[in-house]
Image (tube, rainbow, N blue to C red):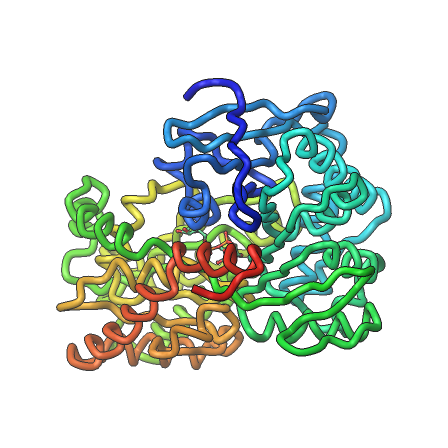
């Protein structure tokens, strides 16, 4: 890693440098080893000569006026700013995770709105724009990510930036009846409309957004999901995110040899493994999932002593009250299930909240007979795709997937369930546990093709093609 920003040569129009902007920027070292989600998915967009701009992860006394720059060995420029503690609390815990996150996951009951939080959100988006401005080249393509930065494009336009700007939302979008619960709904719709391209995970999210264009902005969308707002033509696109399936499959194969995988194998003996891997978040449906596992043991007693459920739930956003409540709730339910069904030599539910390395998780997926992915709402859910990629195709496990995960639109050969119905989820787990090898192979082969097609690479290519304004590859 070196210092100093590399100034690219002038390029032909539409072929400019890609500037990724996300709330959290992985450090160049962190990127390869530990990161999940965004960092992995965007690895293909962050190629030599590109720039990744965002928050350093540091809370400081004052928000930085200028970005710190680091150049990775691969030639990616990482530009980061610190955020003032007082703004961070309101921007991140307050508006982004206390209002937008619950709303966009259809949980209006958990929404906490107040004006100072929203003002801090606008302020931090403005600070991002001011620090990014001096780093921009005229032909850069700016690609903004996720719900923390919904007003950034408008701030950049206010500073005179005329580059093409794309925005991709990783979480779901909601129809007007829900969005209008948020007091600044119209302002946010208008700010997003400062982009040239706005991308969503599913066709349903695109539809919900266009309904808001019509009802909240009062503009009728035209052909090709395009609409005009404030003299700009905006294109709304569906570009589902994926994983680097090939790399993940290799990781899972090799992970069978890790000490963690050996310990898990030994502790299970020949019992079946049901596995859940999530951030500890109320959108992931964990209390309902625990209940469904309890229903399995109750309604299908033949599986008692023959199955273990391992839930890995990485702690997340612990400063937000609703996350603390969730943790207590899960502790209680796990205790109830183990109290009711445990034997002196068998504990059915293992639940852990400390971090597990990515390669160990890959090995756990491969050992699991069932990948249990039952969010109440999820933009996509990459765990579902990772689980498919990790399977041994000669003896694959079964994916049980919520109909409310974006991934369910594509992964239709999974056992699709309604996560609110514990009996239905228990019946799907039973079906998976007794499923013939032939059916498991057939379902997996179809899922495998899809996960190998809608990859992270494809996601980046398609979104960037839209952003360049060109034809699809
Ligand atoms: P997340 O809500 O964070 O992401 P998800 O897509 O399920 O959810 O996971 C992202 C990554 O985190 C995956 O690589 C996964 O392996 C990893 N991960 C999850 N739980 C973990 C754990 N306990 N320990 C270690 N690693 C863990 C948001 C949206 C999703 C969308 C992604 C990407 O909420 O719907 O799929 O962005 O767009």
Please give the count of numbered marks on the rendered protein: 0
Q: Name which residue lies at 35% across and 35% down.
A: 33
Q: Residue furthest top?
A: 3
What quarter of the picture does the N terminus occupy?
top left
Q: Nearer the viewer, residue 14 or 294?
A: 14
* Location of residue 241 in the rendering, given as x and y in whole percent from the top left corner: 46, 60
Q: Name which residue lies at 53% across and 61% down.
A: 470
Q: Is residue 381 left or right of residue 105?
A: left
* Location of residue 96 in the rendering, given as x and y in whole percent from the top left corner: 69, 48
Q: Quadrant of residue 233?
A: bottom right
Q: Nearer the viewer, residue 223 or 435?
A: 223
What quarter of the picture does the C terminus occupy?
bottom left
The answer to whether 93 is drawn above or below residue 103 in the figure is above
Q: Is residue 437 left or right of residue 428?
A: left
Q: Is residue 31 left or right of residue 272?
A: right
Q: Is residue 262 left or right of residue 304?
A: left
**Can residue 361 be seen from the camera position used here?**
yes
The answer to whether 471 is drawn above or below residue 46 in the figure is below
Q: Name which residue lies at 63% across and 30% down.
A: 135
* Location of residue 296 in the rendering, given as x and y in whole percent from the top left corner: 36, 74
């Amino acid at each position: 890693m070196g210092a100093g920003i590399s100034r690219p040569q002038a390029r032909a129009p539409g072929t400019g440098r890609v500037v990724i902007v996300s709330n959290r920027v992985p450090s160049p070292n962190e990127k390869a080893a530990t990161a999940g989600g965004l960092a992995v998915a965007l690895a293909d967009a962050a190629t030599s000569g590109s720039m990744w701009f965002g928050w350093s992860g540091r809370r400081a006394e004052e928000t930085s006026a200028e970005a710190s720059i680091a150049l990775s060995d691969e030639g990616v420029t990482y530009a980061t700013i610190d955020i003032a503690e007082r703004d961070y609390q309101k921007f991140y815990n307050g508006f982004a995770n206390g209002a937008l996150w619950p709303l966009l996951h259809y949980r209006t009951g958990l929404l906490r709105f107040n004006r100072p939080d929203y003002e801090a959100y606008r302020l931090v988006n403005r600070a991002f724009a001011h620090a990014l401005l001096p780093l921009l080249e005229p032909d850069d393509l700016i690609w903004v990510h996720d719900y923390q930065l919904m007003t950034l494009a408008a701030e950049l336009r206010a500073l005179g930036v005329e580059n093409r700007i794309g925005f991709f939302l990783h979480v779901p979008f909601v129809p007007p009846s829900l969005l209008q619960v948020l007091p600044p709904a119209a302002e946010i719709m208008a700010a997003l409309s400062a982009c040239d391209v706005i991308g969503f995970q599913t066709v349903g999210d695109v539809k919900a957004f266009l309904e808001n264009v019509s009802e909240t902005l009062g503009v009728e969308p035209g052909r090709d999901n395009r609409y005009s707002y404030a003299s700009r033509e905006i294109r709304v696109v569906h570009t589902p995110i994926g994983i680097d399936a090939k790399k993940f499959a290799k990781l899972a194969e090799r992970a069978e040899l890790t000490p963690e995988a050996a310990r898990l194998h030994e502790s299970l003996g020949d019992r079946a493994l049901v596995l859940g891997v999530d951030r500890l978040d109320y959108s992931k449906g964990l209390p309902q999932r625990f209940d469904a596992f309890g229903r399995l043991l109750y309604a299908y007693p033949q599986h008692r002593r023959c199955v273990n459920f391992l839930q890995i739930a990485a702690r997340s956003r612990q400063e937000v009250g609703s996350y603390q409540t969730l943790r207590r709730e899960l502790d209680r339910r796990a205790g109830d299930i183990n109290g009711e069904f445990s034997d002196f030599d068998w504990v059915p539910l293992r639940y852990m909240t400390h971090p597990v390395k990515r390669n160990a998780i890959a090995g756990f997926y491969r050992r699991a007979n069932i990948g249990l992915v039952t969010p109440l709402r999820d933009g996509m859910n990459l765990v579902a795709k990772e689980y498919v990629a990790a399977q041994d195709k000669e003896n694959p496990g079964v994916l049980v997937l919520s109909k409310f995960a974006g991934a369910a639109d594509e992964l239709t050969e999974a056992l699709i369930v309604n996560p609110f119905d514990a009996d239905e989820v228990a019946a799907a787990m039973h079906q998976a546990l007794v499923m013939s090898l032939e059916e498991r192979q057939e379902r997996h082969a179809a899922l495998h093709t899809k996960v190998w097609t809608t990859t992270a690479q494809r996601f980046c290519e398609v979104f960037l093609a839209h952003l360049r304004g060109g034809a699809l590859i």
